[in-house]
Image: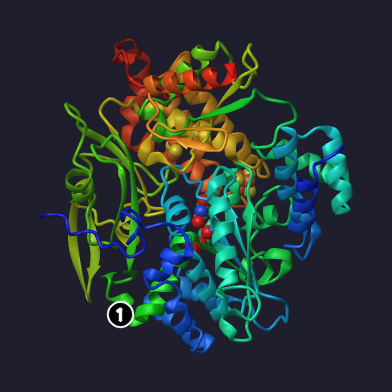
Amino acid sequence: MTLSEDTLRRIDEVITHYPVKRSAALPLLHLVQEEKGFIAPEAVAWIAQKLGLEPINIHELVTFYPMFRQKPIGRRHIKVCRTLSCAIMGGYRTCAEFQRQFGTELGAVSPDGEVTVEFVECLASCGTAPVVMIDDELHEKVGPEKARELSERIKAEAKR
Amino acid sequence: MAAPEQKRMIFRHIDEPGYTNDLACYQRNGGYEVMRKAFQRKPEELIDEVKKSGLRGRGGAGFSCGLKFSLVDRKSGKPIYLVVNADESEPGTFKDRYIIHKDPHQLIEGIMIACFANKVERTFIYIRGEFPDGAKILEKAIAEARAAGFCGPNTLGSGYGCEIYVHRGAGAYICGEETGLIESLEGKRPYPRIKPPYYPAVLGLYQCPTIVNNVETLCHVKHIADMGGEAYAKIGTPNNTGTRILCVSGHVQRPGYYEFEVGKVTMGQLLNEVCGGPLPGRTFKAVIPGGSSAKVLRFGERFKGKRKAGAEMVEYDWGVEDIPMDFDSLAMIGSMGGSGGVIVMDDSVSMVEALGNINAFYSHESCGQCTPCREGSLWMKKITARMVHGEARPEDGALLKSVADQIAGRTICAFGEACAWPTQSFIAKFGDEFKGYGAGKAQRPQGAAELV
Ligand SMILES: Cc1cc2nc3c(=O)[nH]c(=O)nc-3n(C[C@H](O)[C@H](O)[C@H](O)COP(=O)(O)O)c2cc1C
Ligand code: SF4
Ligand code: FES
């Protein structure tokens, strides 16, 4: 596996934060996923070796923590909150609208390769429900109308 | 009675126009002056101030912060760690988000005072993975503070030094439970540890004595160091001191965050006056007062008994609207203040469907170590999902209750209770709705929000 200079530098830096190397497992997984888009088997082996662990010690994290994925996703990641405060304010309709816009199933890559739409649990922004995270950005009070606007924007960016 | 004014201490600057999250702005507003003074005092004195303040943890359990500081094993010779719980994952809770994004230096100042008081030299802020911007903001704020000598080696020229690191989680609710959090910080699956023997105060991070505190709790420590424990204890009500941020979500006109002296505002004042009451044409049906794990309250039910008022015992007879929003009152009426997340549901919501939504959350988030929790949370989810999408039988409520009753008290961590209480309380208070759900399904209003 090859990683950029910058990622390698950040990996070496973050390991120094901890008195025990193993603690750097999650930070390394985040850094690798940020660059590669997902965690492939060779990434698991690479991180394990870097931290002096067995591959299973890393693999079991990838399968437990919801944010790590073993397969690529669409160019943009649309995460709609599914939990109570968002649901009672219409979160399911918001999610259905995103799916309709991109003609896609939950968790799948849309046919145009643009997005993956997913339900996630409470994003700690319940007061502005329903909320959606697109990649790293939080969008508040996203009803079907706003979901359409956001979808249009993603589609317009894709054309460029 | 009219609702009292908010008392914004932690959220003083949160919505202030022109207030930014950088060091310069924080210092223009008196930032790090409290820490400067605190560093002139003896660490033990600062712990004493926190004890006198009566501060109770704002993360969920409401445990005395001063007591937590004094339980730390200081004889082992091992380093002492402070871990800041910024996992903010209890559904309905969204206060730490604003502290982190809008006033990160307040948190850092609180952390540094707590570290100095407890002789901690390395501290980790465990922030949930879904706050990527929050993590960047904190890292920038720490770098600014470090460059200015407010953390890092030889902090404020005192000879004492402490490093603060940000550690990102990756989307698992159980990382909010303090021992699960510690395992996660050690680079493992966040399987909560069994207590005894793994009390963090003795055998925490790397088997060293560890203090785990919520973000809001540590901000309060700064204000306690500022005004002194006794003055702080005069804010709020006895045994429920200080202010508390209440996060209101769901079916009210003005959802949002509101900071009040603890116990000075009632549920009715909060929902009807502060939050503007129900949505047009609706009435309140139910409210969960302290994050989704807290037992639900039904509008119209009454709570009767005797309570302490000063030295005397007095009778009380409260409706939901009369309950003061403090730890003890909410515990007394059978629920809890928890994390301060108030979730409001109006008469458009089916309680079966709301419980189905909650059950799906807990089933997804159980770490899977304990059979009653792993299997029970899944069964409860499956039963409620079947009721909503398939056949609903009159006896399903009793079945749900029997599953929930076999979880609480039989697990490693308090998640067992957290996943059982919603089911137990929904069935106890809305049992008829569960019985009649199958028969009445056809009459469910068109256009009601889907929940399961
Ligand atoms: C299932 C579960 C989830 C929890 N989630 C959180 C959380 O997201 N944030 C938090 O501060 N405390 C959470 N707690 C409470 C912590 O275990 C711990 O009591 C708290 O961080 C202590 O800090 P405090 O005394 O300052 O409240 C959770 C507890 C349980 C049982
Ligand atoms: S109670 Fe549930 S979440 Fe807690 S340790 Fe057991 S299985 Fe894990
Ligand atoms: S329920 Fe959606 S952000 Fe909390």
Taking B248 as reference, is A19 above or below it?
Answer: below
Return the x and y of residue B124 as percentages of the image width and height.
Answer: 62, 62
Q: Of residues A95 and B272, which is closer to you in this image?
A: A95
Return the x and y of residue B136 as percentages of the image width and height.
Answer: 57, 51
Question: Would residue B50 be seen by someone viewing this image from the given angle?
Answer: no
Residue B233 relative to residue A11: left or right: left
Q: Of residues B316 and B445, which is closer to you in this image?
A: B445
Quarter of the image that includes the N terminus of chain A: top right
Q: Chain of mark 1?
A: B
Residue located beneath label 1 in the image: B231
As helix, strand or loop, the secondary structure at mark 1 comes to helix
Residue B338 placement: quadrant: bottom left
Q: How many marks?
A: 1
Taking B179 as reference, is B173 above or below it?
Answer: above
Residue that sits furthest to the left in the current view: B1
Taking B277 as reference, is B219 above or below it?
Answer: below
Return the x and y of residue B94 as percentages of the image width and height.
Answer: 42, 47
Residue type at numbered disc 1? Ala
Residue B411 relative to residue A151: left or right: right
Taking A11 as reference, is A144 above or below it?
Answer: above
Residue at x-position 45% and y-position 58%: B21
Question: Would residue B264 be seen by someone viewing this image from the given angle?
Answer: yes
